[in-house]
Image (tube, helix red, strand yellow):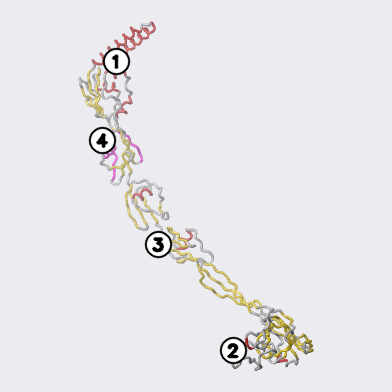
Amino acid sequence: MLTFQLKSCLQHTVNLIRQQRLSGRLGRSLGLIGLFLALIAGYVLSGMPVTLVINHQTYQLRTHRSAVEGILSEFGLVLAAEDIVEPPAAGRVARHQVITVKLARPVLIEADGRTVQLLTHQQTVAEVLAEAGIRTNTHDELLVNGVAVPGDSRLPAVSNVPPLEQKLNAASILLTRRTPAGAVSLTRPTPVQLILHRAVPVTLNDGGLSSTFHTNRPTVGEALLAQGLTLYLGDKVMPGLGTQLTPGMRIYIQRSLSVAITVDGRTIKTRTRRPTAGEVLAQEGIALMGQDFSRPPADTPITANDTIQVVRVRERLEIEQELIPFETKWLPDEEMPLDQQEVRQPGNTGVIKTRTRVRYENGQELTRELEDEWLDQEPSDRLIAYGTQITIRTVETEAGPLEYWRKISMLATPYSAATSGKDPDHPRYGITRSGLQAGYGIVAVDPKVIPLMTELYIPGYGQGLAGDTGGLIIGKHIDLGFDVGQPLPDLYEWRDVYVLTPVPPADKIRYVLPNWPQR
């Protein structure tokens, strides 16, 4: 600390330097500065040596002050009532005196909705709270600088180092300005933040089971989490999770049940507080439409881990028809020439229809029920008129004119005894169906078309007698006989066959001939 005289001397020296500079006498100015510094050094070294210890940090200095209070003021310390100074601030100082200063530690306490600031020399959390007049309970939570600690734990160790030189020599004191009054905050220990979370009693009703516990958490949700309770989205908590806790609060948890739903080919797992199967489906937005139903039924109470199956019902009406073929009826017409035909009525197929109701559950056919059957269209016969009028005509032949009463277009082929299928040594070799010997002039016919022993005329062959039959001779097919040894002609063609008179009795005439083979 500079005295008033030293300050005056310094100011006088500075003025001389200015004057010498103005007059150009720089050499004399430097001499004056050296003299001034010597005077300062002499002044400092003439001071009384003192050791200052601030919170176990030692500083060596010389001073011309004789009282502790003056030395601390010179050093720039502003003390609080809670700080401890030895010897007392009003005491006198001797050479090599040790002055000890114990600065109280600042503590910021947040408890019971208020903030308390104090300076203390206590070392444990419990001692600090006791000094502040704050009592704690067993379940209360204490946070020191944001970290939970037990009540008997010590305060954190002082971590900061005062930003001052450990030894203050004379030159540093005299050549620096006075330390600001706030310098004490730089040497005071780091402030400690102490937060007290009060534990309050809470009654919990969890699914009908009641219990009481203490918690220091601020909200319902945090208190339940601290208790290790698992909550699901389907659970209902009253009051809500974000509600601030108050002493004696009652918390109710309505637990949801785990339920599975199978619907439309997929499985949905959910949780619900709904009491019945139908309400659970409504919760999940699953609608039962038409004849849809559920297993168990919609009004069935739900228990944990139940599975609800949704059965989709679809009904379809199937219309089927059965055809009734019509019949063909032949009507003789005496005014129509033989072998002519006329369709008098085309004929219609009858239709029987049935209506069947088919029920499907989840896409699988379950039942078929015949609802109705009716005749949708009656069949009508096909009516064909055929001619029975016979007219005798004459055909010119190599043997002269011959009378015939019918002309039939037939497929002609050749045969002989050798091609009849019997060996020459067979007793019936060459014997025809009529008993006549096979050969030229004997033809094979279908007796349903041309009766046996009917005389015929075939252009290009001549007259023939229907005396034989054959397994392949069916309908309008005629096999022309040839003698054995005579080469068989390459014959396979349609020829007109004239049926010669006399006309057989009406009951022996087939008026409607078959239509095979066909050209």
| Mark 2 or mark 4, whichever is nearer to me | 2
Q: Return the mark for residue 127.
A: none
Q: Report the Cα–Cα distance between label 3 and label 4.
A: 59 Å
Q: Pointer 3: what residue?
A: 305
Quarter that holds the C terminus: bottom right
Q: Pointer 2: what residue?
A: 423
Question: In the rendered structure, which amino acid carries the disc numbered 2?
Answer: Asp
Residue 359 is a magenta residue: no
Identify the image quadrant of residue 461: bottom right
Residue 381 position in % (x across, y down): 69, 81
Question: In the rendered structure, which amino acid carries the disc numbered 4?
Answer: Gln
Q: Report the Cα–Cα distance between label 2 and label 4.
A: 145 Å
Which residue occupies 56% across, 72% down?
Answer: 357
State how many labels appear: 4
> N-terminal of the two: label 1 or label 3?
1
Q: Residues within 10 Å of mark 1 (few under 14, many from 20)?
A: few
| Mark 2 or mark 3, whichever is nearer to me | 2
Q: Residues within 10 Å of mark 4 (few under 14, many from 20)?
A: some
Q: Pick the residue in front: 482 or 131.
A: 482
Q: Pointer 4: what residue?
A: 122
Whether residue 156 sits left or right of residue 386 in the image: it is left
Asked whether the beta carbons under mark 1 and mark 3 sit within 8 Å of each other, the answer is no
> N-terminal of the two: label 3 or label 4?
4
Q: Pick the residue in front: 36 or 347.
A: 347
> N-terminal of the two: label 2 or label 1?
1
| Mark 1 or mark 3, whichever is nearer to me | 3
